[in-house]
Amino acid sequence: QVQLVESGGGLVQAGGSLRLSCAASGIIFSINAMDWYRQPPGKQRELVATITGGGTTNYADSVKGRFSISRDNAKSTVSLQMNSLKPEDTAVYYCRTYNPALRTVYWGQGTQVTVSS
């Protein structure tokens, strides 16, 4: 059974930093691409950052230069370091992965990030 468990959300002032983590189980973590998505209040869920099994990263334009995604294959975790946070970064942040063999998407339960102005 695949499980993704996020942690690290909270309330922070604008300009501050937070680090989110996602612990994965039930998958061959080292070969899976891992994503961070977010869903702001009243808006659709959007892709924030992706890291492939080989470590290649991609970011949404809105977070480039401020956020950094990384992975620790030994611990089956993926992290999102968020710096210079803005009120518009306020959202529920979700960890996601995809199994192409099963054509199945897996989501974590989400963690709330609130940035006050």
Image (tube, rainbow, N blue to C red):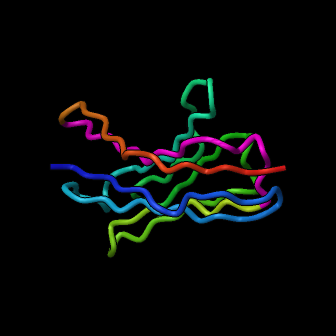
In this rendered view, identify the residue nearer to me: 111 or 71: 111
Position of residue 94 relative to residue 78, above or below, is: above
| Residue 81: percent from left, percent from top | 62, 63
Give above or below for 75 relative to 35. below
The x and y percentages for residue 112 are 55, 48
The verdict on residue 81 being magenta is: no
- Residue 85, image quadrant: bottom right
Q: Residue 12 location in percent, x, y?
A: 72, 60
- Image x and y of residue 25, in percent: 24, 59
Give the residue at x 60% y 58%. Answer: 10
Residue 89 is left or right of residue 56, and the answer is: right
Along the viewing direction, whichever of 112 and 63 lies nearer the viewer: 112
Q: Residue at x 57, y 47 (%)?
A: 49
* Picture residue at 47% right of the left edge, 47% below the top: 35
In the image, 14: left or right of 75?
right
The answer to whether residue 31 is left or right of residue 7 is left
Q: Which segment is the magenta one?
A: 84-101
Q: Looking at the image, which residue is at 78% across and 45% down?
A: 87
Dividing the picture into quadrants, the one containing residue 54 is: bottom left
**Residue found at the very far bottom of the displayed protein:** 74
Q: Nearer the viewer, residue 115 or 85?
A: 115
* Total numbered labels placed on residues in the image: 0
In the image, is residue 89 part of the stretch drawn in magenta?
yes
